[in-house]
Structures are given as C-alpha cells and as structure tokens.
Amino acid sequence: MKRIISIVVLLLLGMGFFLYPHVSNLLMERNQSYAIQNFEDQVKNKARDEMEEEWKKAEEYNESLSGNVLRDPFMQGSGMVLQDNYKEVLNINGIMGYIDIPDIDVNLAVYHGTGESTLKKGVGHLEGTSLPVGGAGTHAVFTGHTGLTTAKLFTDLTELGEGDMFYLHILDRVLAYQVDQIKVVEPENTDDLKPVAGKDYVTLVTCTPYGVNSHRLLVRGKRTDYHAWQEKQAAEKTERKLTREEQTLWITGLTTAVIILLIIITAVIRNRKKGNER
C-alpha cells in the first residue's frame, strides 16, 4: 500500500508541476483583465475636453525630452533623473494604457517606469523615451519580462515576425503599429531605441535567450492606420488556437486524475483479496 501511495503522490506532484505555470498565468490574466476594464471604465467617465487636455500634456512632454542617455531597463541601479511630471501624464488610476498583441494573445496593462515591482505585474514604459501618443520623431519603448513561472508577459515575443500588428490603447484612442524590425542586441546597446526624425516608432523589449537573459530582443513597430476589424479578426484567430490548447490541458489533467483513481481502486481491490485469503 505504501508503494501505491508513493506512486499517487508522485503523480500528484508531477501534475502540480505541470499545471502550476498555466494556473498562475490564468490568475495573472484575470488580474490584467480587471485592471484593463477598470482603465476603460475610468476613460469612459472622463469628458472629451479632459481627454484632449491629457493628450496635449503628453505631446508637450515628448517635445520637452532633451535626448537623455537611455539605459537598459532590466539592469538595476542604472536609473536616470526623470522629468518632474512624468508619472502625472497619461495616468489613469496608475495605468498608462494597455497593449494588445493578438498574434501571441498578449493583452497587458502598461505602467510608468521599469522597476522590478512594475515588471512583475505588467509592461513598463521606459523612462526617458516618448510617451505613447505617436507623432513624427517619437519612439516609445515598452519592456516586459520573459520566462516568469507566474506569468507569460513578453515570453512569446519571439514568435512575432515582420508584418505582425500590435495595438496601443491610450486614453480613448487606439494606435496601430506594424512590426518592421526585429533585433537581438547587447544590454548596453540602446542605439535602436532612439527617436528617428520623421518616424513614429514603438519598440517592445525583453530579455533573451530564454533562461539565460544575456541579450535583449527588440521588436520595433512603425505606425500604421488602425482598423478595428483587423484587431478583432486577429484576436478571434488566436482565441480559437487557445481553445485547442486549453482542451489539451484539461485532457492531460483528467487523464492523470483517471490514472490516479484506477491505481487507488486497484490497490483497494488487492487489499480486500488479501484480506479474504487470510
């Protein structure tokens, strides 16, 4: 019987090890959905004039940037002096907006700064880069972790290719960007994060390779026209793919549960037979 118990315990531990990242990520996604819904509710309650004023403040902030030296967002202790009003601009209950990347099922709140506590709960906006309101000569940079056991975040950024789309939901507007450049660079190489005259860029940054994190993956998008149907269509396609993955997950869990149940039933029957023989 002890042997049976050991087998059951090992199976339960294995199932727990397998399911933990998925369950943790589901909880993270639920928290993100709540944060995004709260953001959208707050935006809906703001007057149109107030929204225009907020947008104007962000544009003025971008104009005031003086070309500060950029830093690696994942390197602790390499901070920089921020503008006094940085965290006051585009701040809706602590959230700057949210990013939607349909092709990899990413829908995450964006926060000011790139501190560790920020990057554990969502995407961080790199201080010293343009605020994400678009415009010629702007270049906003967003950073997110890869490989956390508790959340997917930017883990699947490696699956994006040139031509893929991502969307920024800022205040009551949506800005569309199409991936036009993907690079892997050394952490100290920030040249590709600088603004380019006449261009409207957003770059997504994460650590790579998975588990090593010695370099930085830069996925740059150039501004393009936004079409709501395009974002919706891509999201529906990804949703169908995820449904299949969830089915596989449930089948794996149920199969393991059935195996454990059969082992227990077999053990009980054997013990009864031994008891009867005695």
Image (cartoon, rainbow, N blue to C red):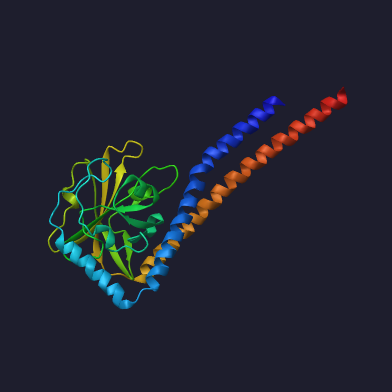
Q: Nearer the viewer, residue 222 or 59?
A: 59
Residue 18 against residue 64 in the figure, above or below: above
Which of the 4 image quadrants contains residue 269?
top right
Q: Nearer the viewer, residue 99 or 158?
A: 99
- Please identify the quadrant where the N terminus is shown: top right
Q: Position of residue 10 (x, y in %)?
A: 60, 31
**Which residue is rendered at x = 79% and y = 28% of the image?**
271
Q: Is residue 276 above or below residue 193?
A: above
**Residue at left 51%, top 56%?**
243
Residue occupying image coordinates x 26% and y 69%: 55
Q: Can the viewer see residue 87?
A: yes
Apparent side of residue 204 relative to residue 23 in the rendered image (left or right):
left
Examine the rendered structure and indicate whether residue 57 appears above or below residue 203. Answer: below
**Residue 85: percent from the left, percent from the top?**
23, 60
Residue 231, position as x, y percentages in the image: 37, 66
Residue 199 in view (yes/no): no
Considering every residue shown, the one lying at the far top of the view is: 278
